Amino acid sequence: MTRIVFMGTPEFAVPSMERLADGGFKPVAVVTAPDRPRGRGQNISPTPVKTAALRLGVDTILQPESVKESNFARDIRDLEPDIIVVVAFRILPPAVFTCASLGAFNLHGSLLPSYRGAAPIHRALMAGEKATGVTTFFLKEKVDTGHIILMRSMPIGPDETAGEVHDRMMHLGADVVLETVRKIESGSVETTVQNEEEATLAPKLFREDCRIRWSRRAFDVHNHIRGLSPFPGAWTMHGETMLKIFRSRIDRQAAEAELGAAVVPGSVLDGSNRFLVSCGEGTLEILEIQQEGRSRMTATEFLRGSDLAGGDRLG
């Protein structure tokens, strides 16, 4: 039996682990993050991967505080893995990923070498990409640079959010993970070297990355909003109040001239009970929003109880 050690933490990794088990590759051990306070009540809770591993009856579950500790590398060596499968986990040192006799591979949420980094789904949508996909590759010390094993592409809808792409991608990824393990086990893997000249980056998102720049085209602002929805959320300010915007639509009928002359980007337009905002080029309609301290709601619901008025500025 091929000895699989599976490493992952969030919901994104769960279908991959379950697909392996269904395909006859139940992990001999699972590695995930420690139990942490989660949710509104901040109750100590296991990760989604740990919960699934317990449900699958995995015998060994490791939850290291740091993957760089020498004891962790020793624990992995003691498991004598044939293959280490990594899905949405931490960056592993060579002392860990070289423990697998047949190799260690990662599932990445882009078509490498495009969008290397921590936020490939978000960054692809924010850039207005029409397609993305998943890649499995053998681990190397330099992050996301290893030889490619398999790739599968998927389209991105023009109004699809990062959350929606994430949910479709995690199931596509699960299929590719199982196929990758089968190829490695059978010795039929043919890898492809990544073209460094085509590499692009998808760095971690910080708060200021999520701020909406209304001076940009409506097309770009729309992509920014959907690329950050539902988490961490694109945001703007109305006075001293922060507004998170989760869904929008480019208004292709309401030209600024028809709504009253050229206006400053970020201006709220009087759109007959529609939440319309002027951009550097074009107009955007806000569809779903959350005011600081309140629940997420439709723009229609928000406008009923808001003091927002035509002529107000967002920024």
Image (cartoon, rainbow, N blue to C red):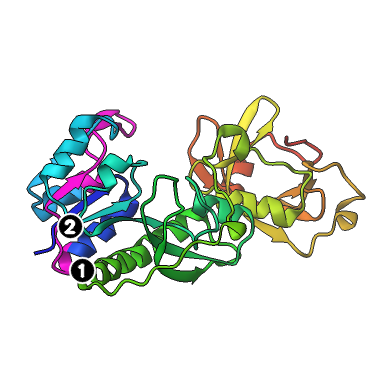
Residue 55 visible within the image: yes
Residue type indicated by callout 1? Glu
Q: Residue furthest top?
A: 240
Q: Percent x, y for residue 231?
A: 48, 44
Q: Which residue is mark 2?
A: 82
Q: Percent x, y for residue 232?
A: 50, 41
Dot 1 or dot 2: first in sequence order is 2
Q: Quadrant of residue 95?
A: top left
* Label 1–label 2 contact, CB within 8 A: yes
Residue type indicated by callout 2? Asp
Residue 185: which disc? 1
Could you say whether the residue bearing mark 1 is in a helix, strand or loop?
A: helix
What is the spatial separation of the Cα atoms under label 1 and label 2, in whole angstroms?
9 Å
Q: Percent x, y for residue 223?
A: 64, 54
Compared across the picture, whether 77 is left or right of 68 comes to: left
| Residue segment shown in magenta | 21-50
State the quadrant of the N terminus: bottom left
Could you say whether the residue bearing mark 2 is in a helix, strand or loop?
A: loop
Compared across the picture, whether 230 is left or right of 106 comes to: right
The magenta stretch spans residue 45: yes
Q: Percent x, y for residue 187?
A: 24, 72
Instruction: Look at the picture and state if 275 lies above or below 25.
Output: above
The residue depicted at 12 percent of the width and 55 percent of the height is 56
Instruction: Look at the picture and state if 71 lies above or below 29.
Output: above
Compared across the picture, whether 185 is left or right of 311 comes to: left
State the quadrant of the C terminus: top right
The magenta stretch spans residue 187: no
